[in-house]
Image (cartoon, grey):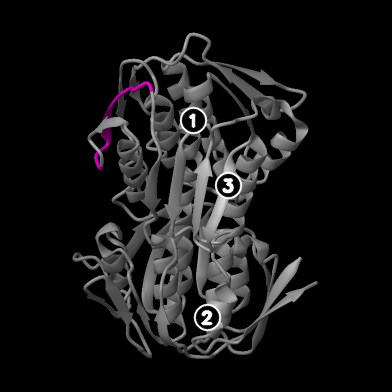
Amino acid sequence: MSSFIVEGGRRLNGILTPLGAKNEALEVICATLLTPEKVTITNIPDIADIRNLVSLLEDLGVKVTTIDHHTITFQADDIDLDYLSSYEFKVKMKSLRGSVMVAGPLLARFGTAVLSRPGGDRIGRRRLDTHFLGWQKLGAEFEYHSESKTYSLHAKMGLRGAYILLDEASVTGTANIIMASVLAKGETTIYNAACEPYVQQLCKMLVRMGAKIEGIGSNLLRINGVEYLSGTEHSLLPDMIEVGSFIGMAAMTRSDITLKNVGMIDLGIIPDAFKRLGVNVECIGDDIHVRQDEIYEIENFMDGSIMTFSDAPWPGLSPDLLSIFLVVATQAKGSVLIHQKMFESRLFFVDKLIEMGAGIILCDPHRAAVIGAGRFNFLRATNMVSPDIRAGIAMLIAAMSAKGTSVIQNIGQIDRGYQRIDERLNALGANIIRTDD
């Protein structure tokens, strides 16, 4: 298990460029299974989750050609469907949450798929009902095998278009049903669809491949199935969660940082939400400048009540950023309520922040009240274990702002979502040492 040794209290200065979006990459890489032709994807981050997914596709028979560190060509012209029943396939699926999106394309193109309970962050219940209900509407049947804990899916007569009202605006569920629908016969209507920029990107890529999709960017999609999809080229958006992480990091460490090429139009309310937290965020074209400030003050609502940040479907605030907002609020002036509606285990890492001296009351699994110290009570260094990607980066931000030297274990969780984060931050003045225990 690898660890970070982090010297706190160092201010950073310089330029950071966010890498390609992890969540978009997982969707569009799976979509390459929909065609036997070549699909080239650029701006791919070199992170553990992506490497694991690419390895899974290679084992399925996809020809993978690495053009450079961030560009890969995929060609799924000789898929080994027998591999789906292998023990190795089930093990790899369990190591990666994004592997669930392999099922939709396989079901659409080959009429069969196997799904085991996917891995990923342990942040509470992450049900797959939305995926299965959508596939059933399209005519698929599934069977659960208790011994192997897997589902086998079949569409012997092929998938057919249907009206689908999603029970929740699930991002991966929407993506999976879209990928299943583009080759289905007839028209599919998906209502209450997730409309995050990454889902929009998936749809735009599929349209370039020959899919017929209307309503991109809304929660009502209409898809007319086609018989064949061709190859294409696709470039990933900058990762909005990485952008938000760096804004929070700059505020906590009292640093002067410019974020270049952030994809401003696709950030939604993220910059304004940080401004309400008191962070000095200046948007200049497609760049963001976070100015060095000693104290930032949390706004109240117009009626004087305490500010609340909660997650919501796009264009609301992403649940992946609430851990960042929480840790940044500990050193702000004022109070805020963090309401994590979606996942019931994502706030449990606050115990370590409390140990570091943060003024936090964990009200219940979904809500935490933060009483900001306004720099009058700096965090103290401690030893921590990263439980998931977003808690891990929040812990790293806390350690970088604390007095003393902290140790963060299980940093493989951070590596799943942030490429060479230690090297990139050290180049701006941080002192983060990676060790192998």
Q: Is residue 125 left or right of residue 262?
A: right
Q: Is residue 429 visible?
A: yes
Residue that mark 1 sits on: 105
Disc 2 or 1, which lies upstream in sequence?
Answer: 1
Quadrant holding the C terminus: bottom right
Instruction: Report if residue 59 lies within the magenta region.
Output: no
At mark 3, the secondary structure is strand
Instruction: Report if residue 220 lies within the magenta region.
Output: yes
At mark 2, the secondary structure is helix
At mark 1, the secondary structure is helix
Q: How many marks?
A: 3
In percent of width and height, residue 347 lies at 54, 58
Binning the other alpha carbons within 10 Å of mark 3 as few (below 14), some (14 to 19) or many (20 upward) gives some
Residue that mark 3 sits on: 64
Name the residue nearer the viewer: 248 or 172.
Answer: 172
Disc 1 or 3, which lies upstream in sequence?
Answer: 3
Three-letter code, disc 3:
Val
User: Which corner quadrant of the image does residue 211 belong to?
Assistant: top left
In percent of width and height, residue 45 lies at 51, 61
Instruction: Please determine whether, in this image, residue 379 is positioned above or below residue 437.
Output: below
Distance, label 1 to label 3, CA atoms, is 17 Å
Residue that mark 2 sits on: 425
Magenta range: 217-227
Distance, label 2 to label 1, CA atoms, is 38 Å
